[in-house]
Amino acid sequence: MARLLIALPALVAVLIGALFLWGLDPDRDPGAIPSVLISQPVPEFDLEPIDGVGVPGLSKADLAGLGKPALVNVFASWCVPCRAEHAVLTRLVEDDGVTLMGLNYKDKPADAAAWLARLGNPYTRIGSDLSGRAGIEWGISGVPETFVVDATGTVIYRQVGAISTADDLAKIKAALAAAGSGDVAS
Amino acid sequence: MIPELGQFALLLALVAALVQSVLPIVGAAKRNVLWMQSATTTAVLQLGLIGLAFAALMRSFVVSDFTVRNVVENSNSLKPMLFKVSGTWGSHEGSLLLWVLILALFGAGVAIMGRNVPDGLKARTLSVQAWISVGFLSFMLFTSNPFERVFPPPVDGQDLNPLLQDVGLAMHPPLLYIGYVGFSIVFSFAVAALIEGRIDPAWARWVRPWTLAAWTSLTAGIALGSWWAYYELGWGGWWFWDPVENVSFMPWLLGTALLHSAIVTEKRDAFKSWTILLAILTFSLSLLGTFVVRSGLLTSVHAFAVDPERGLYILGLLGITIVGSLTLYAVRAPKLEAGGIFAPISREGGLLVNNLLLATATAVVLFGTLYPLFVEAVADDKISVGPPFFNASFIPIMLPLIVVMAVGPLLSWKRADLPGVLSRLKWVAALTAIAALVAWYIDTGGPVLAVIAIAVAVWLFFATLREWALRVKLGSAPLAESWRRARGLPRASHGMTLAHAGLAVCILGFTGSSAWKDEVIRFGAPGTEVSIAGFDLRLEKVERLRGPNYFSDMGTFTVTRDGEPVAVMRPERRSYPVAQSQTTEAAIRSTIAGDLYVSITAPADEEAQAAGMWTMRILYEPLVGFIWLGTFMLVGGGLLSLSDRRLRVGAPRRSRVPSAVATPAE
């Protein structure tokens, strides 16, 4: 018994070491925060359209009653990565037939309209979140962010930051496919 | 050329370390005196070579040699000279070089000053120290070369993280590392003793100055880091239970336990196996700290650039060092004969309680720090463990420790007379009760824990003074007699009194600034007025100023109390264009009663910014200055104890040795 006790520190050290070895996995991001929204219905929100863009505003009812999966993209004209992401999103809409909804976060309507006029508007609906209130409801930590929402208005995937790598895109597409088949992934 | 020279010196140091890791220990087994004594030469040689490498890197920083990648990434030609110098250890590579420099410093220290240590133990200790040295030198040369060149060299550097461009933080890593790495020599002594299979009071005496030096420096390093966080981060907090803070705090807790348990080994030839275990674990926790900070394993506000390959390498080193030494311990420790029988109520008993509680507290902090990782591994869930956990679990363990700590020094060895001791403390008990009542009266309806903590601090402070007074017969003998006795007391004894009283002073500060803190966050343009803790502050203006490598928005606050002007405070928000980041320079008005603390930041909203609005954070933190005062006393106590004659003269078996065990902390 005493011998076991005296070997205990070494055993504990080995266990902690194993935990560290696991923790060093380069794919693991200790800063990643999973969204509490996953598998939850989209939050209550109802946003006005942006003047001069020509697409309607966005609300919870629009997503819940859409009948097909959609991407909800949080963007702003002042956000540099959004500009890079814009091309990726446009391709998703044009080539893959994805329905894209926009949440224009803390952006002046005139700036947003000019930005969309210059780059093109891939969004079916855009809600103008001037106060940032809807952003809080969605729990966004920055711009851009993209959510995959299924046909019933349930959030099934969240992408923090721009969709920039092939890996990001593959995950978005996989989530969309899962949403389309009605199989809600966790 | 000079960077190459530095790299070559490192390579030679690795060779010297390799020789030192084999020759002396084999010599000790074969009783070859020459081989054993080679350790002294190689240890000094290692220090010289690593010192040369360090000087080479520092020179590259001082002259802004932008052909060296490390200088490019961490310096800038406009940076003030002090921060060019401190940039040497501002990066992962540079701080690792500092790490091995201190490792070599302690090795050479034992080689030169440890003349009274028997040849066999000394040779084995220095060999073990060289094993650690080999591990870290090769780590540096293979994965983190500080002398790597860039071609073509850029015109200017990318600047050091501005948060780190601060006098307090420039000195923080060296002190912290002397503490962290200083425990390496204690570890080496412990492993050498396990290999020899013999631990006696003389061993504890040889180890003591090194433990003390490391502990004192670690105390100063942690306090400096905490002070930096207090005035630089702009939140007015001094401790956040952040993983990186925790990993520096754990070696401190366990090192404190080691310091006390080694006394029992020295005086009473007891707690031997426990002291050895503490020596191993304290350094293991230091290594853990080095690993956590550099691997990106846990999220923290302060960490180096993350590289999984490096993390894996350090984890390997960690595994060999810790698991190897603990396995050796498991094999050898049962053979250590127990000694020194004592009654439960005795000095030994008191120190046992101290050790158990400190070890438990360390385990709690370790658990809280690693728990998020554990949960993520087992349940794939992300959680964070913050101050509520640590406050709820750590403080209740520390409070009884402080209560016992007050009584401990009054107990005699082997068997003590508790009723007698308590009767000597009756006036202290009365003072404590009064202090508790006063605190409760002022703070009616406030946190009960704060009242208890104040009472415990008062109890510790006066019991410590009472113990000192009893020793020098203050009051019961003529003053001249007391003075003679005070001079006759060993310095270590005065050191203990100072350090114990210092902790009591710290507790007052901890309690006041966390339980009775007042905080106002206001958003407004110049002309805004805020009232806090009897002070009225008015934001007069915000000006844009220019520093050597930054721009500054300096706010001017006039502070009045009952209409009388008190002070003008000028907090700043600095932006560093090259490093593209901002820092907060809080304005602090310190008095003995508490600090008035003001910081400003630009609001996130651009429209508000355009309208000249500012976010002001104004705090009143009662008694916070006591934390720094108490820390000075702790460090002073450590230094005083370190200067004790007992540590300078030889062990019992040798006569006086002229050379002094100087403080390696300098």
Image: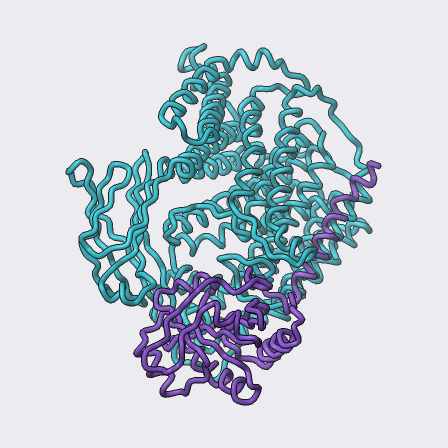
Left or right relative to B449: residue B370: right
Q: Residue furthest bottom?
A: A95
Chain B: drawing colour: cyan
Residue B34 in view (yes/no): no
> Residue at horizontal 45%, vertical 74%?
B72
Q: How many marks?
A: 0
Which of the 4 quarters of the picture holds residue B396?
top right
Q: Position of residue A105 (x, y in %)?
A: 39, 70
Which of the 4 quarters of the picture holds residue B632?
top left
Q: Nearer the viewer, residue B383 or B399?
A: B383
Q: Which chain is purple?
A: A
Residue B449 in view (yes/no): yes
Does A52 sit above or below residue B536? below
> Residue at horizontal 59%, vertical 34%?
B649
> Residue at horizontal 77%, vertical 48%?
A11
Q: Nearer the viewer, residue B597 or B656?
A: B597
Does B332 sit above or below residue A42? above
Left or right relative to B562: residue B315: right
Q: Position of residue B366 (x, y in %)?
A: 62, 46
Does B665 sit above or below residue A162? above
Q: Position of residue B651 (x, y in %)?
A: 65, 34
Does B649 sit above or below residue B152? above
Q: Nearer the viewer, residue B508 or B268?
A: B508
| Figure coloring | by chain
> Residue at horizontal 63%, vertical 57%?
B381
Q: Position of residue A185 (x, y in %)?
A: 65, 68
